[in-house]
Amino acid sequence: MAEKAVLRPTGRVIYEVSLQHVGSLNALRQREPTTIYFSNLRKAVDAITAELAFNNWPPRVNYTAVYRGIKQREFYSCDFDVAGTRVFRVKVVSRILNPALPRLGIDENPVR
């Protein structure tokens, strides 16, 4: 009895959390985007919620919303604003760590 082969990604999934400063306030105070990588989605969400709470931002990010956003759209994004002016955006994207290498377009050596 033959078993069916299960195709799995050859790399490991990691989560990229980036914070981008957006809106008109960014023109006054230029800031570079911040990017952090996590090996576990729960730890990524916990780090985001802890940092938001520490800096008195509303807790608008939760595990279920991030998980569903990544499954449906391959990313999760949430904007934070003050008095109708966007200040920053939190974005979570899943990435493959050490993906399988393509053939790089190299043909077989014709000389034997």
Image (cartoon, rainbow, N blue to C red):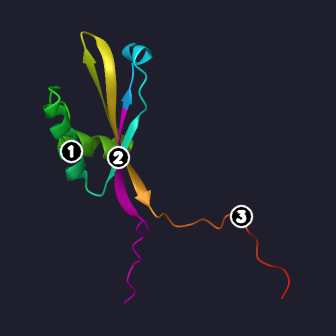
Per the image, the residue denoted by label 2 is 36
Q: What residue lies at 43% left-to-right and 22% top-to-bottom?
A: 30
Q: Which of the marked residues, 1 or 3, is nearer the chain's N terminus?
A: 1
Residue 47, which numbered label? 1
Amino acid under label 1? Ala
Circle 2 SS class: strand
Amino acid under label 2? Ile
Per the image, the residue denoted by label 3 is 105
- Taking the magenta stretch, the answer to whether it contains residue 6 is yes
Q: Position of residue 19 (x, y in %)?
A: 35, 34
Q: Quadrant of the N terminus?
A: bottom left
Q: What residue lies at 19% left-to-right and 43% top-to-bottom?
A: 64
Whole-angstrom CA distance, mark 1 to mark 2, is 10 Å
Q: Position of residue 46 (x, y in %)?
A: 17, 45
Q: Position of residue 3 (x, y in %)?
A: 38, 83
Is the residue under label 2 in contact with that under label 1 (CB below 8 Å)? Answer: yes
Q: What residue lies at 39% left-to-right and 73% top-to-bottom?
A: 6
Q: Residues within 10 Å of mark 1 (few under 14, many from 20)?
A: some
Q: Nearer the viewer, mark 1 or mark 3?
A: 1
Q: What residue lies at 40% left-to-right and 13% top-to-bottom?
A: 24
Is residue 107 toward the left or the right of residue 52 in the image?
right
Whole-angstrom CA distance, mark 1 to mark 3, is 41 Å
User: What's the magenta region?
Assistant: 1-19
Q: Which of the marked residues, 1 or 2, is nearer the chain's N terminus?
A: 2
Q: Position of residue 49 (x, y in %)?
A: 17, 38
Quarter-wise, where is residue 18 in the image? top left
The answer to which of 31 and 18 lies nearer the viewer is: 31
